Amino acid sequence: MLEIQNLSVKLGKKDIIQQLSLSMETNQFIGIIGANGSGKSTLLKTIYKGLIPTTGKIVYNEMNLLHTPAKKIAQKLSVVGQFNELSFDFTVFQMVLLGRTPHKRLLETDSQEDYDIVEYALHEMGLTDYRNESFLSLSGGEKQRVILARALAQQPEFLILDEPTNHLDIRYQLELMESVKNLNIGILAALHDLDLAAAYCDYVYAMKNGEIIAAGTPEEIFTEALIEELYGIRCVVYRNPITEHLAFHYYI
Amino acid sequence: MNNSQKNRLKNKKLRVNITENENHSHLKGRILIKLSRTEGASLQLAKIINKPTLPRNAQFFITLGFVALFIFSILFSLGNGQADISFTDIWQILLYKTTHGALGSIDTINQSVINIIWFVRTPRVLAAIFIGCGLAISGTVMQAVVQNPLADPYILGISSGASLGATFAIMVGFGTASIFSQISLSFSAFLGALLATFFVLLLSSFGGKMTSIKLVLSGTVINSIFGSISSLIVFLANNAEGMKTVTFWSMGSLASASWGKLPLLAIVTMLVSVFFSFQFRVLNTMLLGDEVAVTLGIPLATYRKLYMVIASLLTGLIVANSGMIGFVGLIIPHIVRGMYGSDHKKLLPMSGFVGALFLVWTDLLSRVLLPNTDLPIGILTAIIGAPIFIYIILKKEYRFGG
């Protein structure tokens, strides 16, 4: 479904991503792990046209993303990014309604169908009662849920998440991952929390210095050696006796 | 209840169920998760529509009030000034003039009154409407373009550019021999404004992407440079009379409004206002910033340049007509945002409307406050606008739109 070939990205004069290739299949949940500055966000930004790569090719369902208009991409792909600060305020409803933008022609007004989709997305994120609140008055976690609701209102077939559980408390971390997983659409997520990555991802890519150094299912990839190489810490990987998921204990 | 009735009732129920399901069929596409759980709830919720800052009907009545106030303001402004003229006379004169004598009678009205109403006050009130509308629209667009609540129509160096143009025309002139001698003060101000805007756009596009921060900084830099060149000219010319003219020009005035100047101003203002009113989707996503806008399918860089050029042309034309009228383009968008929220679909037309209303009143005050003299309107806009602005901020816990 998504195919990235020999991608290189520079920010200023610095190489952030070098000759990176990656592929994922329809409706897979793909995780990208790696330390701060390993190029995870840059990779995601390049996919959604936030950055222009120096070389390489990104193909999504036979559509070359680098040569496709942003609007056409936005109809298929939505993004929950890291920075959502605003100088001006919107109500939560207006914010989520903006998710309908790629499906609208310039002069088209919002239809009842759009309102229904927005209400549905609000409901999914437990935001129905927040409809008329001002976005800027919300807490970080609530803002994150609004942004995810906006992404849902785009009705994407593919979702990019850049550290989606930032700012969220434990309950909402799990709820968010759960509802995202249940969407049954393709998901590419940069994740910090290895427990979450192990529990939800079908396949994981590990990045270091702009390159992929390991890839595989969580079972294959999460080894003590790899985690030490990625993050420079020592760790014990074990199977949680209650959940049967992989679990990690870190120490210096 | 007989059998056929029961059957009908059953059918009805069945139909209701079917329509409920159909209502949700569009949701069943890509994001369908737990439909059965949410079906009932979301059906109810769909009925409740978007409720922004103020309740919908409150907004409706405020809008109605504005329209009524607007019509009253125009007539009131026509009637008051150095000479007070009755409403019936105004009505007769307007009717007579607009229908070329077919309707209305001006036989009983003094010719000087007719001249005041038709040749002085009517073009002046119309100019106030278009200039107020244009400044407020331009300000709203600039605030969205640079994502900065402090932006106003002059942010791209227009004020200093126009001042330099005006200063140059007054102090130096363009000589008598060349074709440039025909260039008037206002045209020179217009050229100066365009020149400054051009430099700001050029400066902010150096070194890769044109970001809003770079735009604001470039605007500040160009403002300083053009400002000091103006000062240099004033200093070297040592011309007291000219200095007074420049100062007076920079305070803004609608006194020079005439039927001859109106058509261009009116047409440009209306075209630009209509254009931007149709751009509400792009303007809304602009507030989210470049990175988010592109994920919603809108590459901002192109739109940003286009909008700035159009808004700057409008502002330049306004400045050429009326000099510098500050504050309108800064506070009117904020005041309207406080009432109607950040959605440009409402914000933009209402800003234009409230801007027009505001300038009609400030122009009227500028005519009546001091006996036998016109107060520069730029002084009044700030003195009247600031308290309204402070009130909005304090009262509504204003958060720039939400």
Image: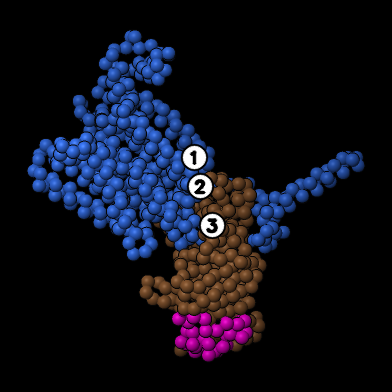
Chain colours: A brown, B blue
| Lateral position of residue B42 relative to residue A39, left or right | right
Q: Position of residue B279 (x, y in %)?
A: 47, 46
- Residue type at mark 2 is Pro
Chain to which the residue tagged by mark 2 belongs: B
Residue to which mark 2 is pinned? B52
Say the numbered circle drawn on residue B59. 1
- Marks 2/3 same chain: no
Residue A232 belongs to magenta span: yes
Q: Are marks 2 and 1 in contact (CB under 8 Å)?
A: yes
Residue B82 coordinates in the image, percent (x, y): 25, 23
| CA distance for labels 2 and 3 | 27 Å
Q: Amino acid at mark 3?
A: Lys
Residue A102 location in percent, x, y? 55, 55
Q: Is residue A67 above or below residue B311?
A: below
Q: Report helix, strand or loop for mark 1.
A: helix
The number of callouts visible is: 3
Query: Is B161 drawn above or below residue B184 in the view shown?
Result: below
Marks 2/1: CA–CA distance: 9 Å
Direction right: furthest residue: B3
Q: Which residue is mark 3?
A: A71
Helix, strand or loop under label 2? loop
Seen at 31% across and 17% down, the residue is: B114
Rendered image quadrant of residue B370:
top left
Q: Amino acid at mark 1?
A: Gln
Q: Is B397 positioned to the left or the right of B84 in the image?
A: right
